[in-house]
Every structure is written in C-alpha cells, then in structure tokens.
Image (cartoon, grey):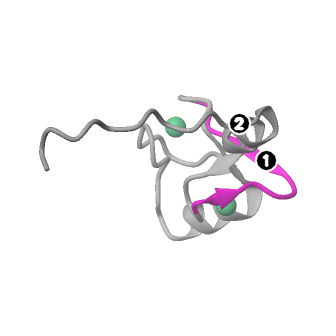
Amino acid sequence: MSDKKIPPPPVLPPSEFKMKQNFCLFHKGEIKGEIYTCPSCKSKYCLECAINAKNEGKKCVKCKQMIFL
Ligand SMILES: [Zn+2]
Ligand SMILES: [Zn+2]
C-alpha cells in the first residue's frame, strides 16, 4: 500500500482561506471580536485569549514573545 499516490489537497475557496488568516493559536479557532497582534511575529490572536495567556504567563505560540497588553 506504500506505492499509493497521495491525492492533491483540496483547493480551498477564498472565503475559507481568509478565515484561516484569522486563526487564533491559543484556542485553535477563528478569531472573533477584537484582535491582538504579536508585536514580534505579527501572529493574530483573540484579544481575550491574549489577556488569558498573559495572566497565565503564556507566550506567543509562534515566536515565544511575551504578550504585551
Ligand atoms: Zn509572536
Ligand atoms: Zn482565541
């Protein structure tokens, strides 16, 4: 079964691609409401998740930058 060809990934419609750009890595879902942008890597998170992360001493998932709020 190892010689089985992998099918090409499905092409996402533009609306879904746009949604993926507002993906919060803290709660692993679409960002709703206000957005917090990491000053270091420009990753976007929910403002609410960023506040929670800061309170819990968590850092940016991508670059480990501290949350500045
Ligand atoms: Zn970052
Ligand atoms: Zn979030």
On the image, which quarter does residue 48 sit in?
bottom right
Let me know if residue 50 appears in the view: no
Residue 46 locus on image (x, y percent): 73, 55
Counting the numbered discs, the total is 2
Q: Nearer the viewer, mark 1 or mark 2?
A: 2
Q: Is the residue 59 above or below the residue 40 in the image?
A: below
User: Does residue 51 sit above or below 42 in this rendering?
Assistant: below
Distance from Cα at disc 1 to Cα at disc 2: 18 Å
Which residue is located at x 47 percent, y 40 percent? Answer: 65
Measured from the top left, where is residue 30 in percent x and y? Answer: 72, 56
- Residue underneath mark 1: 35
Question: Which residue is at a point 76% across and 36% down the rendered structure image?
Answer: 18
Q: Position of residue 38 (x, y in %)?
A: 61, 38
> Magenta span has 29?
yes
Q: Tell me which numbered mark, 1 or 2, is placed earlier along the sequence.
A: 2
- Which segment did they paint magenta? 28-39
Mark yes or no: residue 24 visible.
yes
Q: Foreground residue, 54 or 34?
A: 34
Are there few (<14), some (14-19), or many (20+) residues within 10 Å of tag 2? few
Say whether marks 1 and 2 touch (CB < 8 Å): no
Q: Which type of secondary structure does the marked residue at label 1 adopt?
A: strand
Q: Is mark 2 on a helix, strand or loop?
A: helix
Q: What residue type is labelled 1?
A: Ile
Apparent side of residue 28 relative to residue 62 in the rendered image (left or right)? right
Q: Which amino acid does label 2 sit on?
A: Phe
| Residue corresponding to mark 2 | 17
Residue occupying image coordinates x 54% and y 29%: 41
Left or right side of 61 for 48? right
Res 22 quadrant in image:
top right
Which residue does the image show at 62% across and 30% down from the upper left?
42
